[in-house]
Amino acid sequence: MQSYIVMQGRTYHEEKELGILWSLQQDSAGNVQHFWERMKEVNVGDRIFHYVKGDIVAISIAKTGYREERKPTPIHLPGNENDKGYLVEADYYEFDKPLTIIDVFDEILPLLPVKYSPFQENANGNQGYLYPCNDELTIKLVELISDLNIYEIDEEQLEFVLGTVRKTEHDFLTPILAETEAEAKTKVRLGHQRFRNELMPLWNDKCALCDIELLELLQASYAKPWKDSSNNERIDPNNGILLCRNHDALYNNGLIAFDGQGKIHISASIPEEDYNKYGLHGKLRVSRTEENKPYLKWHKKHIFKE
């Protein structure tokens, strides 16, 4: 199962009524965009969160993969009336209470990828159509949506038609959210297990900086985080370093990094007189290979805090 966020400000209601997602293939100048091409990645059973004017208002489950099809008549996109596009059929489940992104942005910001984020740093949605939603972001969104929408309904309410309708809707929504969360958590857990098991022998089962060997104190530290990695990169043991918990915390928070030669770089936010406290010194190096070099450089460029 993969997850996505679709930006549907102008076309949500029409696409929901038709039970589809539809995007252009290219713009009037013939340019192809990643957020249209991503429609080709959607498979049966994938989850899509629907973003409309600041809110995530629904979740859908893909019923088909993509197919090429001209724009359905009910969808109004001026200037694109006869354009070919990509169409995916989906079952929509709308929330009683939408999730307003700006209200929870502090919680989701750390989970947004550096590249192809659906949201800007001011919490506004990015222009485009279909964006990736990594597993950790999926889990967080489901938790936040569940907090708003999954609740016990007073038995007296069931005497009213509205209450009955809402209960029926939640009977569908609850298992969908629970299954989405469970699948995403399982994918992350199994991915982390495989990554750790294959990474440890590359570093001789000890911290690359201080030689600690106690398993309980060792962490498989990603260079390129899960949220930014492709499926293959998430389980590539070259995308990481085996570190003790102390050095792992420094690495994950961008306080240390390693260049393409394996040489350590220490953030200016750590005073030099404190290096010994953290088991650091300026001449430390880690083993650099051609396989891990791109990952080390990515971390230094995007995570390290000079």
Image (cartoon, grey):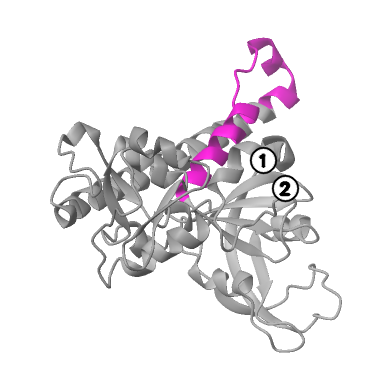
Contact, CB < 8 Å: mark 1 with mark 2?
A: yes
Return the mark for residue 105. Answer: 1
Along the viewing direction, whichever of 185 and 258 lies nearer the viewer: 258
Classify mark 2: residues with Cα within 10 Å, few (<14), some (14-19) or many (20+).
some
Residue 5 figure quarter: bottom right
In the rendered image, residue 159, in percent from the top left (x then y), is placed at 71, 15
Asked whether, in this view, residue 206 is left or right of residue 235, the answer is left
Q: Please, what is the three-letter code of the amino acid marked with disc 1?
A: Phe
Along the viewing direction, whichever of 58 and 157 lies nearer the viewer: 58
Return the mark for residue 123. Answer: 2
| Magenta span of residues | 135-164
Return the mark for residue 50. Answer: none
Residue 70 colored in magenta in the image: no
Residue at 33% x, 41% y: name it: 247
SS class, disc 1: helix
Q: Please, what is the three-letter code of the amino acid marked with disc 2?
A: Ala
Residue at 67% x, 65% y: name it: 129
